Image (cartoon, rainbow, N blue to C red):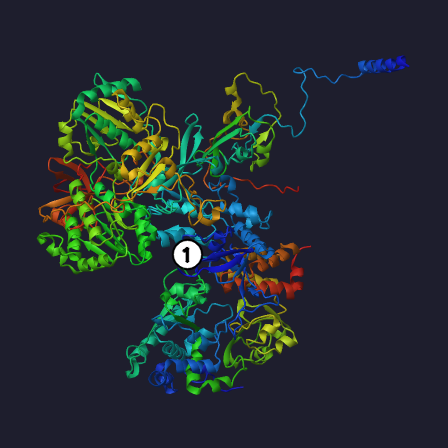
Amino acid sequence: MKTEHVLLRHRDHPEINELENYRKIGGFEVFRKVVTTMQPNEVIEVVKSSGLRGRGGAGFPTGLKWAFVDQKNWPHYVVANADESEPGTFKDREILEGNPFQFLEGVAIASYAVGARAAYVYLRGEFWQIAHQLDRRIQQLYHAGLLGERLFGTDYSLHIFTHLGAGAYICGEETAMLESIEGKLGQPRLRPPFPPSFGLFGKPTVVNNVETLTNVPLIIERGAEWYRSFGTEKSPGVKIFCLSGRVKRPGNYELPLGTPFRKLIYEYGGGILEDHPIKAIMAAGASSSLIVANDPALDTPMDYESVPSLGAQLGSASVIVVDDTVSIDWLINKTVHFFRHESCGKCTPCREGTFWMMHLTDRITAGKASWQDVELLKDVASQMRGKCFCALGEFSIEAVLSGIERFRGDFEARVKG
Amino acid sequence: MMLDDLARGLATTLKMMFEKPVTIQYPEEKRRVRTRFKGRHHLQRYENGLEKCIGCSLCAAACPADAIFVEAAENTDEERYSPGERYARVYEINMLRCIFCGYCQDACPTEAIVLGDNYELSFTDRRQAIYTKEMLLDPVPPGGQPTPQRTPSGVYTRSVPVMKDPSD
Amino acid sequence: MAKLVTLTIDGITVQVPPGTNVVDAAKKAGIDIPVFCYHPKMEPVGMCRMCLVEIGRPVVDRATGELVRADDGSVKIQFSPKLETACTTPVSEGMVVINTSQKVKDGREDILEFLLTSHPLDCPVCDKGGECPLQNLTMEFGSGQSRYIYDEKMHSAKHVPLGDLIYLDRERCIQCARCVRFQDQIVDDPVIGFYNRGRALEIVTYSEPGFDSIFSGNTTDICPVGALTTADFRFGARPWELNAAASICTQCPVGCNLTINVRREAISQGRMAIKRIMPRQNEWVNEIWICDKGRFGYHYVESEERLDQPLVRKDGKLTPVSWDEAINLVSMRFKQAGSNLLTLVSGRLSNEDLYNIRKLTDSLNGKSALYTQMGGGDVVAQVGMSTGSNLANLGKGDVILVIATDLHQEAPIWWLRVKQATERGAQLIVANARSTRLDRYAKYPIRYAYGEQNNLIAALVQLIDPQKFVDAKAIKHLSEQSIIKDTAEALKAAQNLVIFFGNEGSGVADSQVLAQTCAILLATTNHAGKPNNGLIPVWQRANDQGAWDMGWRPPTDLSTSIKEANALYIVACDPAGDDPRLSLTPDFLVVQDLYLTPTAKLADVVLPALPFTEREGSLTSGERRVQRYYPAIPGRTGALADFAIAAQIAKACGITLEERSAAKVMDAIARENADYAAISYTELANVEEQWPIIGRADLYYGGTSYENKQGLGMQLQNAVQKGEPFQISLPELVEQSGEGLLAVPITRLYDRGNTLIPSQLLRTHLVSTVMWINAKEAKQQGVEEHDVVQIECGETSALVTVELEDAVPDGVVLVPRSVGIPISEPCRVRLHITERV
């Protein structure tokens, strides 16, 4: 167990959301070192060696993504994904409010590494207050000579802009986010081509999650080996786990990857409210398969390789805990409502399927359905699998299918006859 | 012997004399038609007087004899003939072409065109064979209004009624 | 040529160019993959998920780069665990596509089931029924039962007017985005778009008036369901009840190929009526598109006002008479007039009409005149577009020059083809006195003062070949401008050069000179005579080129020619209506037309003619493609085709001309006119398979445009291509002068000509009697917007309403043609305010 935070450093150092305090603990020294003494590809190599993987849910190796940027097409862009809309996820918000400068430094280093001279921070519309504060902080960086033209006497310039969304979860999908920044309808694009070849305004773009970028300054400062000292071999480093649901102490917990569920839920989270028996775990927010919370599951380490053995994904590590007071049909009704509301409507299976599933789950939870309707729900969800344009549709069915399969009793209790 | 056969035959004839004749003295007596008898067509109405026919031409398409001619037009709430957007402005059946197969009745999505019981359809001029919509349309049922009607907006928006479960 | 890619689809091997997507590759192999959102003329988006198929690719050993083979030597194929969308997948070497497996069929059934969940039960009342891709695919791949509860269906607005031409039914929409992408990608007019998200995703219009695009009708062809329908065809008929006739649009010189759908109508006692006009595929002319004017502007042929019997003036009144009486009277008076007969025709007539009328006039030693405001047709015969040309061939390395015309308003499909050429890399030069809608695609937008158009072209010629003009004083100021120098360089370097010229800012004489100078430019840059090079005239009428080819020429001075004539034979034009001050008082006036026009009202004899929908004929487009049209409905009794009327008059005069068969008239033309020697109605009816393959049983692929089975037409050779010597002399350069406000007539798409006014549907779109002026000039002239002003030109004047328009140059006012303002070429005017609002 480590004592000092890597990401949630505001819990160790007070008020480092003020620039002078952040600089006191060495803030932006790394950026200066990077710009004045390192080559972009050196930076990429360090990040590659650290094994840092995308913290937004996909888990793609960050260094590799940076290396894919098309060097023949200019200019390049970096876009920070602060659209945090997955239910049960609130880590990026804490970073943006508590440790924003480390995040901005991460953006700056990433920009240098991929040769971008402009970076965008895309914030969900509901974060408008955070966006205003971030604008103020960015201005402070300009005044301090840490952003702008010809930084540190070199010919590298960097500008950072914030951009607000307007209430769409789908804009957290990287290509939909790019469409949104371009002022178009927030619908995902065809891939290939991928953003590192054809991204914002048609130019090579790297899209990274806030948490991912916040890791970068300390990785550069303390080295890849240091980062690898946490976590597991294939999932190195630390992760902020957003614990919520029926636990005594919900909140953000920064822990090394590979920490077992049991530790997070019982040691840090204080266990289940009123000490009820635990029933299910949703490890990736609403986009999860429901994990049956038996002993083997609780002992499973939370990393990108081990969680799939439970028939689920770690995703963004938004761990929602469910106990026996929650009926699973009610739970999936909630997730299905969410996906129906957030579906962009571009592709047929998701647009029609989430709408249909919502009607079915509504009827099931209202006690007005028969077992045939549950079978129909399973059918509809299975029909959507493998056919959707983007991950929203594909993941919207996970809770439904795993719920019916692994918690059949809850549904049987609900249907008539 | 031969007389035996003759006797049997005559006995049959005699028996027939006392059996009730099946001959019906038409036209003074008329036999009731069977169910599903396919006679003269008529266009049905709903109880409120609106025509069921929505001018979709499915009957014309189904007709193997190309006997039906339909021209559709737009309903407005000020001048409404049928529920929904569309009604038949012209509806003609050429009774000389018609073979009374009932395919039009089967094809109709609103149970508008049905073949009724009337089989007394003779005429003396070819032109009288073209039955127009006025001739085919049912009279307004009691309690209903004649068409065109003036209807409140937003009420009669559906053309095709909810069909009953066919397995009923 | 790039190496072709070989792949196998359902066991059939096919070779296609790299970059082809799997749907198109399958089509080339004769296999249909169902699609909704994909359209062969647009970029694929992979939205509807209907084209999901199984795709397998050869396995390549990562280490060696070699193909992995099975024991029997065949290449190992790795199939993706998920189905892939065929439209977004480009072909690759050795790919294996499976279109008929159970997995694929189940996938299609699933997608259809999803689409039908909230799709309304509208088939009986929906106009698309019978030609609906959703219906057809549901029959082929859908499940027979619905598992969705009716009460849970989402309901949306139905019958929403997007403008007054197109209706949107939001419930039927399957959100395939074809309409939005058509407006955005193809015609660059994004006046419709998506609104909201998820199941509530719906089409809205952003323009006021709604769906304000002259190509809006095309979206109803490509919409795969009945969401977008035309107001014109609403509830008109079922597609299977319609008969189809091939025709050619007569509204502008592009010559778009049409299919006219007809059916008997009860309301007119069983008369055949035109129900709608649809595009017919011709990749050399209009691809599968037509503009709204051609699609909706046909109602004039059904107008009650049409003449249906000959009229002769008796006791001052026009009285109906028999054809015999009329013909006898006409022939007698024409013979009497002899060389004092003047025949005036317009380019609305077909080649056969123009030929017969010319022969008649010539045989009587009469004079012939073409009623037009634009010259240059004989120049086009020398350097027009030649055989083997297709605007679709123009791209990178080619240059297009558009001068003195507003293509968007005068020839919309050419505007579209030019725009698309620039998207393929062609360089566009747009020269006009004002900015027009084509400017945004132009590399070299050039402004000049009205009247300078010829000098501009001359300046370009001079820059390319300084020896050309001896006295270049008049063009010196032009040749010194850097944009003109750059343009000259581009013209020199062009692989192919196409020049569109019009008559905006000029009359007959000036446009004739402009044509000549443009021809010289083509010759100077060595582009004349080659395929995909040439001069394209933007005539005001459909067959002006045919008129010129048939030997008709505009008179030097129309009013003088009219005054000198004793007998006037006016066919298909309305000089008195266009210019009331024109004195039409010959001894004997015969008018042959469709309606009782103002000119006809002055006539001694009125002969009723048939419109193009009721007869056969051929037209020569501005690209010099001869195309034939077929009759769509039987001719109204009492009227005859123009060539037939001319032949009957001729017969009564003792001259033999073909009277009944337009094909035979064309044969006569072919015998006499060397350019048309190879043309015959049989040749004009030749067709070949076109790409993309549209209009067959798979309506979902390309939309409901009709397959062309009746004729693609024939492109004429130009003189230079035939090897004849270039015979155009250098015109004189004139310096522009003149003071005072210049009024220039311009052509608007929705004009008030006799062929549009009868259309109720387009009534609100028609241009009114306005005068366009820019704000600065208005202030200087002391007029304000909405003032009613008398515009005075010489001895004529007209009342117009002032409209402010930025694009109008200083010192100029623009007036629309065809609204009764008697200004047919630029003239100096004075303004008097009569009414201030």
Q: Find residue C538 and report its image quarter.
A: top left
Name the foreground residue: A46 vs A181. A46
* Residue at figure coordinates x 65%, y 59% from the top left: A414
Residue C490 position within the rendered picture, expressed as x and y whole percent measured from the top left: 23, 59
Tell me, yes or no, if residue C191 can be seen here. Answer: yes
User: Is B125 located above or below residue A392 in the figure?
Assistant: above
Up/down of A132 relative to C760, above or below: below
Local SS, label 1: loop
Q: From the viewer's perspective, is C396 left or right of A271?
A: left
- In the picture of the structure, the residue carrying the numbered disc 1 is C43
In the picture provided, is C748 more to the left or to the right than B22? left
Taking depth in this image into account, of A109 and C315 the one nearest to the observer is C315
Please identify the quadrant where the N terminus of chain A is shown: bottom right
Indicate the amino acid at tag 1: Glu
**Residue C342 horizontal/vertical position (percent):** 18, 28
**Position above or below: C316 against A414:** above
Q: Badge 1 sits on which subunit? A: C
The crowding category of the residue bearing disc 1, from other C-alpha atoms within 10 Å (few below 14, some 14 to 19, many at least 20), is: some
Residue C79 is drawn in which quadrant? bottom right
> In which quadrant is the C terminus of chain A drawn?
bottom right
Q: Position of residue C489 (x, y in %)?
A: 21, 59
- Residue C665 picture quarter: top left
Q: Is residue A165 among what the camera can see?
A: no
